[in-house]
Image: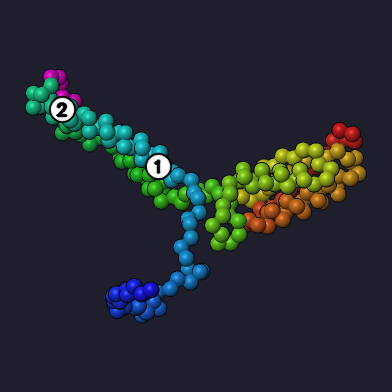
Amino acid sequence: MTTAQHPERYRPEPSGRFAADLSLSDNTTSVDPGDEPRAPQPKASPLARGWTIVLGLVLLGVTAVIIRDVLILNDSVSGRQLLPPVFAWFATVQNESWMLWAGIGCALVAAFFLLVSVRPRRRTHMAFGDGSELYARPVDVARLSTATARRVPGVLSAHTVATRKKISVKVVTAVTPESTETIRARVSTHVSELSALLDPAPNVQVTVTPGGEGR
């Protein structure tokens, strides 16, 4: 039996296209973990947003009046122009004492809009830890505090009101009044552990109402 002779296969030489050194070059900069960009803290809408919408609607109304007068001037539509009487009034107005007060009023309005524009936005969320990217609303912190208080033995129900400075927990217990101090201490300890995770940590206030035995 003769063995079939296979022709020698052609194997091209490595081009070296993918053999480059993948090490960092002098122009490549590495980012340290502490220098990574962080997500911005959630904040409320700017106070100037509502006034900007109102001002935009007013300017749209003025623009509509100008377009209407231009169309009437070009005989595209029929009607009476609204702007010429305004211009005539400005041309004939005389210096009056009320103009001083009107100027002061305009200055106050301008100062108000300036303060509204540069006023910092109100923070709406609470941060977990210094420099953390985890945020929660005060209502979420209140729900966590309520769930934490309900897990304490002897607590029938709990209600929490949370702000950036204080967490107020009201619990109803199924024990005698003599044991309320023990329940208060346990609830305060557990909720304070949750409060310590926030930055800044709000104060914890616990109010206990005895519900009576067998309730």
Q: Can residue 65 be seen in this view?
A: yes
Q: What stretch is highlighted in magenta?
A: 78-83
Discs 1/2, front: 1
Q: Which residue is at a point 70% across and 46% down the rendered structure image?
A: 145
Q: Which residue lies furthest to the front in this view?
A: 1
Magenta span: predominant SS is: loop
Q: What element carries label 2?
A: helix
Q: Which residue is at a point 22% across and 30% down the rendered structure image?
A: 64
Q: How far is disc 1 from disc 2 in space, using C-alphas? A: 31 Å
**195 on left or right of 16:** right
Residue 181 shows which numbered tag? none
**180 on left or right of 60:** right
Q: Which residue is at a point 72% across and 56% down the rendered structure image?
A: 193
Position of residue 108 measured from the top left corner of the image (x, y, whole percent): 37, 43
Dot 1 or dot 2: first in sequence order is 1
Residue 49 shows which numbered tag? 1
Three-letter amino acid code at disc 1? Arg
Q: How crowded is mark 1: few (under 14 residues within 10 Å), some or many (20 or more)?
A: few
